[in-house]
Image (spheres, rainbow, N blue to C red):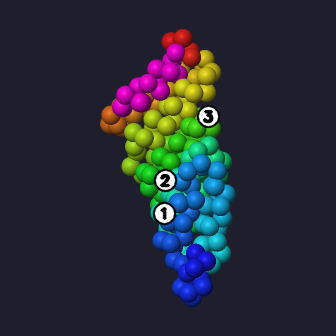
Amino acid sequence: LVAMRTDRVEPNVIVYSAAASSCDKGSGKCWPHALRLLAVMRESGLRLDMICYNTAIGICEKGQWLRAFSILTSAQKFILAPTAVTYGSAASACEKSLQWQRALAILSSMAMADAQPTVIAHSAALAAIGASHKAERWQPALDLLVHMQRIHLVPTTITYSAAISACEEGEQ
């Protein structure tokens, strides 16, 4: 980015998104730098698209659930239509932080936005429920599994495994 500016070439949305994404590779500890790049884009007057927001939420997948949730809300505030990838990444961030209620809230906002439901987002929510290690979580896990079947999402081995984990905690 510095070389581009030295050559008087102004970075665009694609360049900033790629730079932010590359910050996240490796240790996963560079997420503040990546998110700062996205803020610089906004400050530079560039219009962020869903790819930028998906990049930011993906960067937060390693346990920064509150930031992921905030970025999702921000995208919706700017009247951008989050994609299935957006919701799946946000649900995955919640899973890794054991925020199962937030993961379920993301699934609800996915449905309200008429976004295509995905097995990945639902599996992430199920995994968050199962990983919470609370005995009373088995019922929401089964409810979500039934809901998936009702909306014609075919659960995967990972989905069933997450549901079984939740039931195991509840001795069901």
Q: Name the residue under label 3.
A: 98
State the image coordinates of residue 107 (x, y, percent, origin top left).
50, 42
Q: Residues within 10 Å of mark 3 (few under 14, many from 20)?
A: many
Amino acid on which disc 2 is placed: Thr
Residue range (magenta): 155-168
Is residue 57 at all visible to an observer of this figure? no
- Which amino acid does the dot numbered 1 rest on? Met
**Residue toward you, 35 or 50:** 35
Task: List the residue tagged with mark 1.
Answer: 50
Q: How far apart are marks 3 and 1 (CA)?
A: 25 Å
- Tell me the chief SS of the magenta region: helix
User: Where on the picture, by quarter, is residue 71?
Assistant: bottom right
Of the numbered discs in the image, which one, if any, rests on residue 152?
none
Secondary structure at badge 2 equals helix
Q: Quadrant of residue 133?
A: top right
Sequence-wise, the earlier of marks 1 and 2 is 1
Q: How far apart are marks 1 and 2 (CA)?
A: 8 Å
- Residue extending farthest to the top is 171
Residue 16 higher or lower than 8, as above or below: above
Return the mark for residue 86.
2
The residue drawn where x is 44% and y is 55% is: 83
Q: Earlier in the sequence, mark 2 or mark 3?
A: 2
Q: In which quarter of the image is the N terminus?
A: bottom right
Q: Identify the secondary structure beneath mark 1.
A: helix
Residue 84 position in % (x across, y down): 43, 51
Q: Do the residues labelled 2 and 3 touch (CB within 8 Å)?
A: no
Please report the residue visible at 36 percent of the width from the left and 32 percent of the height from the top.
155
Membership of 161 in magenta stretch: yes
* Residue 71 vertical placement versus 118 (above, below): below
